[in-house]
Amino acid sequence: MNPDAIALTRRVGAVCAGEGDGAKDGGKDGEGQVGVVTKTQPKTKQPSMYKVLLLNDDYTPMEFVVMVLKRFFKMDLEQATRVMLHVHQKGVGICGVFSYEVAETKVNQVMDFARQNQHPLQCTLEKA
């Protein structure tokens, strides 16, 4: 709650309790008392987003990388091939941007799948 809203809430509470302006007027049974009701809306913050990154290595076959991109990141063949070539040439590439929980799950799925297929493919995440 911001400081102005807190001050207003305190002032309203004091008036309603008979400590403020209404008590000075000699008001009884609520006469002369004025109150303001404030309603605050909590502000929701967008979740932080994270990039899922695929790292190049000299051993994982390009076809396997394309399969991973299609399977776990729902890319079509053309897009998966483009990302795979980018990773191959630049050393790292972005597979997608997700909330932390989704990004972490995707990284774990890719790493587990690569291990099951005996490939050293590395996948990681970083804040976008």
Image (cartoon, rainbow, N blue to C red):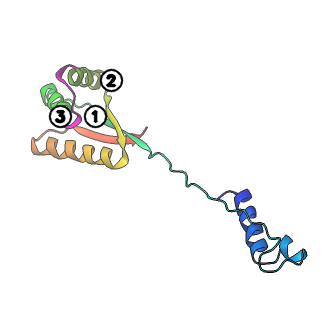
Q: Could you say whether the residue bearing mark 2 is in a helix, strand or loop?
A: helix
Nearer the camera: disc 2 or disc 1: 1
Q: Earlier in the sequence, mark 2 or mark 1?
A: 1
Q: Quadrant of the N terminus?
A: bottom right
Q: Amino acid at mark 3?
A: Val
**Quarter where residue 56 is shown:** top left
Magenta stretch, main secondary structure class: helix
Q: In terms of sequence position, does the residue under pointer 3 or pointer 2 come before the other?
A: 3
What amino acid is labelled 2 in the image?
Answer: Lys
Residue 127 appearing in the image:
yes
Question: Where 95 falls versus 78 (above or below)?
Answer: below
Work out which residue is located at the far left of the displayed protein and give it: 117
Does 28 appear above or below 122? below
Going 17% across and 47% down the picture, which residue do you hit?
A: 112
Give the extent of the magenta segment: 71-78
On the rendered structure, is 31 left or right of 67? right
Q: Is residue 72 magenta?
A: yes
Q: Residue 38, labelled with which disc?
A: none
Q: Nearer the viewer, residue 124 or 17?
A: 17
Disc 3 to disc 1, how far (Cα)? 10 Å
Q: Which residue is mark 3?
A: 68
Q: Quadrant of the C terminus?
A: top left
- Left or right: 25, with 46 as reference point: right
Q: Which residue is mark 2?
A: 90
Image location of residue 127, percent across then percent down: 43, 41
Q: Amino acid at mark 1?
A: Leu
Tag 1 residue: 54
Q: Which of the marked residues, 3 or 1, is nearer the chain's N terminus? A: 1
